[in-house]
Amino acid sequence: MTFDSPARKPAPGPGKTFRVKSFGCQMNVYDGERMAEMLEAGGYAAAAEGADADLVVLNTCHIREKAAEKVYSDIGRLKREDGSRPTIAVAGCVAQAEGAEIARRAPSVDVVVGPQAYHRLPDLIARAERGEKAIDLDMPLDSKFGALPKRAGGQRPTAFLTVQEGCDKFCTYCVVPYTRGAETSRPFADLIAEARALVAGGVREITLLGQNVNAWDGEDERGRAIGLDGLIRELAKEDGLERIRYTTSHPNDMTDGLIAAHGEVDELMPFLHLPVQAGSDRILAAMNRSHSVESYLRVIERVRAVRPDIAISGDFIVGFPGESEADFEATLAIVRATQYAMAYSFKYSRRPGTPAATMDGQVEEAVMNDRLQRLQALLNEQQQAFNERTVGRTTRLLLERRGKHDGQLIGKSPWLQSVHVTAPGLAIGDMVEVRITSAGPNSLGAELLMEEVA
Ligand code: SAM
Ligand code: SF4
């Protein structure tokens, strides 16, 4: 299928504008921010909201079929009324998985760059300018991070910080080990330096990111081997960094130290995103999850023992090949046993090249739809119940953005809920004390008790 003719493009370069559009996970959001910083350092300016851009980077997601297909319709939409189009770069996991096929299917694409090679984007754009199709899917041993411009914080009080990339777990449904490569941890010193730069730029909350963030390991400044809990404890000593979160974790990498940190480190927020995917041991084995229902529930129990108010979140897949009604009911049972504060749930999506794609017992779409609906009804009920349990509590909010109404700001509670508060004189970046007064399924209301608490 052809979308555009490759005619009449403006030459990209300094003085030009760009837009980076990120899809999918938070790691893509982080990568998108780093690409934007790199383009700005090279003389590009971010295009104003709604304005045309000279260069568009589509930072794509390959996790489910729908997400991957979306990139082609997005490329088509970039054609302007006069028939011209911006320079187009496709980055992220679709780029890694489909490679040169993208440029064949969509000839208007100039640059295809994988998630481990985006530090070379400026060179690739220069090659595209000379009329080449510039494709870079390398997974170099030297980390891209060293080649990126230093971070300077931003306009927001919260930031993502990728500490770990890739995955060695090879769940049978998942493309991540193929698109993001092997598990690697960024060095401790680089992370501390990046966190300090963010805090110096006004950031008060950092979310540590990784496909398996709790598999992070490294050496501290004295050469001692540490895990994610050690990194969190070091970051907690940084003046000005008031909140730390991390995501996404694998149940098998919830170490004793990390569980203990939830009870001991005040800066570590009481929120744990711990995907389980399914509630039947038979399906978990077919998924190659390497944990059981019992071991998962045991982790939850231990985290709750040290931090009773912790909000638990999860990911679920319904309709994995071979999933019977009884298997699905076991998923509903683990949801009832865990009591989630929020969760993400998906229909199984058959991904070419993964072992599950060729398994027997692929589940019909109508059955998947029905199961997803039942699961989401239960998860929504639990989310509403969790939110209602916080009504009447006094807590702190870090204000992150403006609301729809005059004087209204939206902040995050420690449990990652969006909370609205209205009071004159409040600003984005303030940490305020509030009492939660109302709860809906997706957001809460609060009254202000104290402005700017340290
Ligand atoms: N590493 C994390 C873990 O182990 O749970 C998850 C990372 S993955 C990018 C995010 C979520 O996408 C997974 O937890 C899973 O629920 C979902 N996912 C991955 N592959 C999928 C597939 N083929 N079909 C449906 N959902 C999928
Ligand atoms: Fe994918 Fe499994 Fe790795 Fe998570 S642990 S990224 S679901 S392979």
Image (cartoon, grey):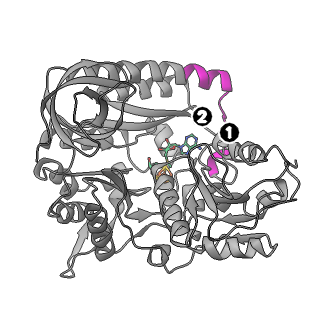
Q: Which residues are magenta?
A: 355-371
Q: Quadrant of residue 381?
A: top left
In this view, the residue in front, 391 or 201, is 201
Above or below, comparing residue 389 to residue 141 in the picture: above
Q: Secondary structure at mark 2?
A: loop
Q: Residue at x 26, y 46 (%)?
A: 429
Per the image, is 361 magenta?
A: yes
Q: Mark 1 — residue?
A: 360
At x 76% / y 72%, what residue is drawn?
129
Of the pair 1 and 396, the residue shown nearer to us:
396
Number of other residues with Cα within 10 Å of mark 2, as a class: few under 14, some 14 to 19, many 20 or more: some
| Spot occupied by residue 368 in the image (x, y as percentages of width and height) | 60, 26
Residue 382 against residue 185 in the figure, above or below: above
Given contact means CB atoms under 8 Å apart, are the residues at marks 2 and 1 in contact? Answer: yes
Toward the viewer: 325 or 21?
21
Residue located beneath label 2 in the image: 322
At mark 1, the secondary structure is loop
**Residue 275 percent across, percent down from the top left:** 40, 42
All told, the count of numbered labels is 2
Q: Is residue 174 visible?
A: no
Residue sitting at x 52%, y 45%: 287
